[in-house]
Amino acid sequence: MRFDPALMLTGKTAAALAKELTGSPDVPNDYLVYDPEHRLLTFDVAAGARASVVTNEPSRGIGSTPVTVARLARVVAGRPTPGLRPFEPRNPFWIVVRGDRVVELEQQYTP
C-alpha cells in the first residue's frame, strides 16, 4: 500500500508549530496535521494485518469496525462494501510498522 505519512500533533507541540506557521498558537479542533513533504511511500502489508475503519451503524452510531485488508482497500478506493457503512473513507489512518511491514491499520475519526 502507498501512504503519505504525516504527524498528528496536539497540545504544546501543535500550538508551537501553529505559531511558527501562522503567527497564532490557535489550533482548530485541538490537533494539527503536519506533512511537510506530501510524499507517497510504499509499504508491504502483512497478509494477516489487523485493520479497522470508522463506521456509522444506525443501531450503535459511530464506531470502529474490524475489516480485512482487502475490504479496507475497497473502502479507501470508495468502492461499495456490502454490509459495511464507512463513516468517511478519506479519514486518515494510524499504521503500525514492524521492520518494513505494516501489521496494523486503524482509521482515525476526524471531526
Image (tube, grey):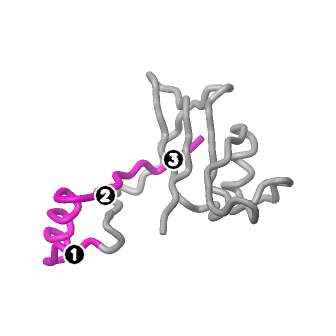
Q: Nearer the viewer, residue 23 or 28?
A: 28
Circle 3 crowding by C-alpha within 10 Å: few under 14, some 14–19, many from 20 = some
The image quadrant where one finds the N terminus is: top right
| In the rendered image, the vertical position of residue 1 relative to residue 4, given as above or below | above
Magenta residue check for 7: yes
> What type is the residue that disc 2 sits on?
Pro
Q: 11 and 78: which one is in front? A: 11
Q: Residue 87 at x, y = what percent?
A: 65, 63
Residue 93 is a magenta residue: no
| Residue occupying image coordinates x 53% and y 31% | 102
Question: Is 22 left or right of 76, judged from the image as shown?
Answer: left
Q: Are marks 1 and 3 in contact (CB under 8 Å)?
A: no
Q: Which residue position is annotated with label 2?
A: 36
- Residue at image mark 3: 3
Disc nearer the start of the sequence (3/2): 3
Q: Which residue is drawn at the image coordinates 36% and 71% (left, top)?
A: 29
Q: CA distance from mark 1 to mark 3?
A: 28 Å
Q: Residues within 10 Å of mark 1 (few under 14, many from 20)?
A: some
In the image, residue 62 above or below residue 100:
below
What's the residue type where badge 3 is placed? Phe
Which residue corresponds to the image point at 78% horizontal and 54% vertical from the top-left? 84
Q: Which residue range is magenta in the image? A: 1-27
The Cα atoms of the two marked residues, 2 and 1, are separated by: 19 Å
37 relative to 57 in the view: left or right: left
Q: Residue shown at 71%/54% (left/top)?
A: 75
Foreground pick, 34 / 14: 14
Is the Cβ of the residue at disc 3 closer than 8 Å to that at disc 2?
A: no
Upstream in the sequence, badge 1 or badge 3? 3
Q: For this view, does 13 lie left or right of residue 36?
A: left
